[in-house]
Amino acid sequence: MPELPEVETVRLGLNQVTLNQVILGGDVLLARTIAHPISVGEFLAQLKNVTITGWHRRGKYLLAQLSKLNSGDAGWLGVHLRMTGQLLWFNQEDPLQKHTRVRLFFQGSRELRFVDLRTFGQMWWVPPDVAPESIITGLKRLGPEPFSADFSTEYLAGKLRNRQRPIKTALLDQELVAGVGNIYADEALFLSGIPPETVCSALSLEQIERIRTSVIQVLQASIEVGGTTFSNFLNVQGINGNYSGVAWVYGRTGEPCRVCGTSIQRLKLAGRSSHFCAKCQR
């Protein structure tokens, strides 16, 4: 599943190619991709002849602010890529990918395609003067953004103090911190030197500060190289991210640790694979 760096990479790309261009129409090839409104016809009608004034990100959600020439605010377009979703920028005459679910047509014979192999991705249209979280209810459950002041050591310590679950599992909880998933939880725990199975309540304040700092560090590093290629991630131009080539532990089972040379190990926690170095993380 695309995580915060991948979604942020998509957001940056969308802001480069779609802003202030009129959406002329669209086509929905898989109706269940549209989570709101229920009517596919209404979804397309509400997006016709509007422009996107800016793409925003909240956790792993993308939110496009919409505007109409005569009436101003035209609401929001929400997107969640889920496991395999991609937003790709094409010429309209380019052949359709097999798993194209939604097409939005722009000026200049360009289009934005939502391609989704597993079909778990969703799109929403949120009416003007309606808070996005009232329609896209998953937004209500998100914790603070990792780069925000709200994601402080004090906040994190308060949330972890009485939890008896492993720290790796806790970092995957979107109510604790928005946007972190399996890849970057593993990477952050490596950088902090803490084993993934460490129980949250056993962490010292100094360890929690190291975790917080490491989460921010690995997310920023991945954004700078355009995300990772894991999970078939592509940016809006169809280009792979580069983070996987420099990952510390994720996806490197049996390979030597980049710091000490010890073989990277993998274990299962709450049904998810965790990659770690037994020497560097203890």
Image: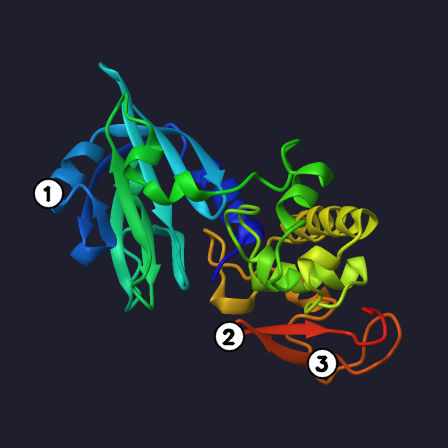
Residue 259 shown left or right of residue 54 in the figure: right
Q: CA distance from mark 2 to mark 3?
A: 16 Å
Residue 105 shown left or right of residue 38 in the figure: right
**Residue type pointed to by label 2:** Gly
User: Can residue 224 be seen in the rendering of this structure?
Assistant: yes
**What x and y, as percent, mark residue 59?**
50, 44
Tell me the quarter of the image containing the C terminus. bottom right
Q: CA distance from mark 1 to mark 2?
A: 40 Å
**Residue type pointed to by label 3:** Gln
Above-or-below relation of 180 to 256: above
User: Which residue sits furthest bottom?
Assistant: 254
> 72 and 278: which one is in front?
278
| Foreground tag (3 vs 1) | 3
Query: Which quadrant holds residue 200?
Result: bottom right
> 238 and 281: which one is in front?
281
**What x and y, as percent, mark residue 223?**
63, 49
Q: Earlier in the sequence, mark 2 or mark 3?
A: 3
Residue marked by disc 2: 271
Q: Earlier in the sequence, mark 1 or mark 2?
A: 1
Residue 235 shown left or right of residue 151 in the figure: left
**Residue type pointed to by label 1:** Gly
Residue marked by disc 3: 265
Query: Dot 3: what SS?
Result: strand
- Residue name at image x 69 percent, y 67 percent: 196
User: Can residue 96 be seen in the rendering of this structure?
Assistant: no
The numbered dot on residue 41 is: 1
Q: CA distance from mark 3 to mark 1?
A: 50 Å
